[in-house]
Image: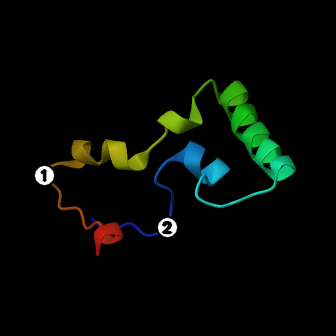
Amino acid sequence: MVAEGGYYNLGDDFIEPDVPESLPRKLFLYAIALTYWVQSQVNPWQVSPLADLPRLSPAGILDLRRA
């Protein structure tokens, strides 16, 4: 299987922890994550497509992040 795009972890996709941001922008991004959590009743940091990849076994998986 080859998938392009998407995200590793939804919560980290909202917050972008490796990107330096101003305090107001960080608060805004956390508000987005909190709104998602409240409306969906799903913690965005627990939504990770990579965590579900083993369920696709025995299909082959090409992970280009390590290339």
Answer above or below: position of 28 versus 64. above
Q: Secondary structure at mark 2?
A: loop
Name which of mark 1 and mark 2 comes first in the sequence: 2
Q: Which residue is mark 2?
A: 5
Q: Is residue 42 left or right of residue 27?
A: left
Q: Secondary structure at mark 1?
A: loop
Answer above or below: position of 46 versus 11. above
Q: Which residue is mark 1?
A: 58
Label 1: few (<14), some or many (≥20) within 10 Å?
A: few
Q: In percent of the image, x 75 and y 46: which residue is there?
A: 29
Residue type beneath disc 1: Pro
Residue 37 in sight here: yes
Q: Is residue 65 left or right of residue 57?
A: right
Q: In percent of the image, x 65 and y 49: which residue is there?
A: 14
Residue type beneath disc 2: Gly
Residue 20 in the image, given as x and y percentages of width and height: 69, 60
